[in-house]
Amino acid sequence: MSDSAYEAIIGLEVHTHLMTRSKLFCGCSAGFGAGPNENVCPVCMGMPGVLPVLNRHAVELAIRAGLAAHCEIAPESIFARKSYFYPDLPKGYQISQYELPLCKGGYIELPAHSEGAEPRRIRLTRIHMEEDAGKNIHESDASLVDFNRSGVPLVEIVSEPDIRSADEAGAYLRELRSILRYIEATDGKMEEGGLRCDVNVSVRKRGASEFGVKTEIKNLNSFRFVEKAIEHEVARQIEILESGGRVAQETHLWDPVREVTRPMRSKEFANDYRYFPEPDLPPLRVSPDMVEAIKASMPELPADQRARFVRDLGLTAYEAAVLTQDRDLAAYFETMLATGLKNHRTAANWVMTEVLRAVNETARPLADAAPLAIESGQLLKLVETGAISLNAAKTAFAAMCKSGKGAGATVAELGLAQVSDEGAIAAACDKVIAAEAAKVAEYRGGRDKLFGFFVGQVMKAMGGKGNPKVVNEILKRKLNA
Amino acid sequence: MADSKISVEQVRHVARLARLELSAADEIALQANLSEILQYIDQLNRLDTSAVAPTAQVGETGTPMREDVIANRPDPEAMLANAPARAGNLFKVPRIIE
């Protein structure tokens, strides 16, 4: 394979909706699910004579995103008109930011998945605010337009060309989504168009200092598509270069059915946007007080939480990375620990296996799919005190997912409590020793390996509920007597 | 940059971006008209602005901001009142994708 002779240079532009109640420049609802053209008004319909008024909360959320990504927040930024004609853009221009964006620089730190590995930093160019366009529905004889999405606030997060593989692009997107959800800037739902991505890809000979010719792949709306499109595009470009050809600077569209990229027809895009400052909006001024107040309201971010989980709770880098992929998952874990659990890693693995399985199997949000975190905590507490085995806890958990009942009630109902009572265990041991006289003689004659057999028999006699530690102790004492 | 003059090609380009269909006579007239406008900009360019920060707008205050509250009620009928064509509550336009 010649692939290793090349490296990919990838930059991502991510558009994501900000979680506001109303639109960016008018008082229409920014919510999803309304009937066609219900959430529209003269402002977001681009009627003559209207004026946009900026939504303060959208600015705050964009600043939160900027602070979380270590950007510099511009004290003064300006809005610009990006002009193009399309039926979903009623004004004939989109209000965006161009020369002076709200947030500049910064970086996203990707979690290290193995011990001792350095976290990778993907630098950002900028984060700016803009309004979304409406939605076109194409029919055989006409196109239909719904303007409910027109004017919904977006941020565009532009990375430097620091990403080197499809996997790394996926890791970057997952971390970005996690951060945006932690700071409650977005709900990160890609299915509703909540997160859209354009990808710039070029390849070059490993060790070369100049970039190759890049192509842009537009409008990818799932992480999987981003990864697949990059893999395909990198392979396509390497093939062209290997056969002595030249990559053309083009804009491509991803075809999710055939899993290939294809060049857009020139009619499908126009690159002359004629940006100029939006005359209807004076500069956006952000005072140091406003930035400080937002800073003070920021929650712990995934990277900090990961570091704390490793440092203070003894988790591995991998465990910490999995738990912090999702704010709700990390919160679930911490609530479990708050019940007083001593074994942090058992709790972490519980969340990563039992809880995530419940989420994946039901395809529902964590809060619906799994019992309350405090009940999971109680269950593991019972394991720690020896009242139930870990396997019994798993059985109880599966039942709790369905019944919604508490840990204590479920363990009692299913009779999962472990027997630690020495009298009961001694009686079971005596019974087994009496029934297996021949094997007892062999054991006492030096066949130590038979010990496991006796443990199995005692457990069987006790219906699997004997506390293994106590069974071991008593059995050993009796056999060696 | 004295004596800015734009070409007929540039006139056609701008017209295409603005979706305007121009006759040959329009093109000549607009070439003269737009060139005059740019020559006025040339006059402004004679001012020394090296000590002035780039200014997008004049005025002391920044843009006002509104609180994030829903203030508009759904009224699709009013919004669609001027639509040349509609399908239910959707605007109907000529098919976009070839």
Image (cartoon, coloured by chain):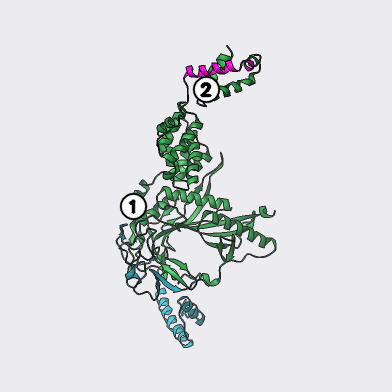
Q: Percent x, y for residue A22?
A: 34, 59
The quadrant the C terminus of chain A occupies is: top right
Residue at screen point 36% across, 54% down = A60
Give the colour chain B carries in the figure.
Answer: cyan
Q: Nearer the viewer, residue A25 or A443?
A: A443
**Left or right, A179 with reference to A451:** left
Taking the image as drawn, is residue B29 in sight?
yes
Q: Is residue A418 left or right of residue A21?
A: right
Region rendered in magenta: A420-439
Mark 1: amino acid: Met
Determine which of the numbered discs, if any, sits on residue A331 in the image.
none
Q: Is residue A225 above or below residue A435?
A: below
**Label 1: chain letter:** A
Q: Is residue A337 magenta?
A: no
Q: Which circle, 1 or 2, is nearer the viewer?
A: 2
Q: Residue furthest top?
A: A481
Locate residue A93: give its quadrant.
bottom left
Q: Earlier in the sequence, mark 1 or mark 2?
A: 1
Which residue was labeled with disc 2?
Answer: A469
Which chain hosts label 2? A
Res. A161 in view: no
Per the rendering, the colour in which chain A appears is green
In terms of secondary structure, where does tag 1 sit?
helix
Q: Where in the figure is residue A86, as x and y percent of width and height?
A: 45, 71
| As drawn, A363 above or below A15 | above
Q: Could you tell me the amino acid type at mark 2?
A: Lys
Residue beneath disc 1? A290
Dominant secondary structure of the magenta stretch? helix
The residue sitting at 57% across, 60% down in the picture is A257
